[in-house]
Image: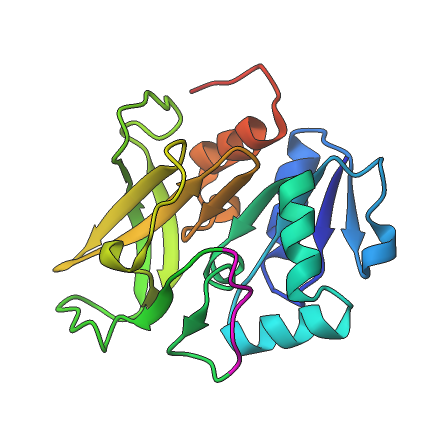
Amino acid sequence: MIGIIDTGSKNIGSILNCLKYLKIKNKLIQNTKEINQKITHIILPGVGNFQNVIKTLNLKGFKKNIIKKIIDKKKTLAICVGMQILFDTSDESRVSGLGYFKGKVQSLKKLKCKDTIPHIGFNSIKVENNINLRLLKEKDFYFVHSYSLKKIDFEKKDKDFIIGTTFHGNINFISLIITKNLIATQFHPEKSGIPGVELFRYFYGKKKSYI
């Protein structure tokens, strides 16, 4: 069963629709006590403001150390701001992130992006590691964000990390991180059509795939 941590994000309805389509049992999680052995996978959604998502998590008892333990024990999918809060800080917030990874999320404006801000629409992902992920090849995913993590801000400490990057104008930012227990996306799989649905399928470990 997948547990979706309720961060108050507006994309939760779309996530629920994807899981319903895939016939995957799920539960909306309101506090840490609801995460039990039946919950094998966790989704950390995020839309909107970095600071608001952190404050909502804190109010529900999901402190930094709790989230870190959850990611280490449960397969986790972090989406958009859900990915950004895994890092130390953000230009968008005076409140610190979870610090699961080292890095600072920066505004596209401060990075002097020469294309539209926010970055809205479908875009591709380049996987840097020499690995064949069929669900990413020649597929576009939906983005909507004004903040991102630059390639140079990320400190890789694990040789098994898979890093995906995306170009928007003159900016190359991290759009995907995959580790043993974690998939983190700057894009919205729940808004990306069939490729996004297939990412949910890949995350949950369902064998049948159309990609």
- Residue nearest the viewer, comparing 64 with 128: 64
**Residue 148 x/y as whole percent:** 33, 63
**Residue visible at 66% across and 37% down?**
19
Give the position of the C terminus as an image quadrant.
top left
Whether residue 180 is in magenta: the answer is: no
Residue situated furthest front in the rendering: 157
* Placement of 109 over or under 70, stated as above or below: below
Residue situated furthest top in the rendering: 208
Q: From which residue to which does the magenta span run?
A: 95-100
Q: Quadrant of residue 112?
A: bottom left
Residue situated furthest bottom in the rendering: 94
Give the position of the N terminus as an image quadrant.
top right
Query: Is residue 5 visible in this depiction of the protein?
Result: yes
Dominant SS type (magenta): loop
Tally of marks: 0
Q: Is residue 4 left or right of residue 93?
A: right
Query: Is residue 146 visible in this depiction of the protein?
Result: no
Q: Is residue 49 left or right of residue 167?
A: right
Whether residue 99 is in magenta: the answer is: yes
Q: Is residue 128 left or right of residue 12?
A: left
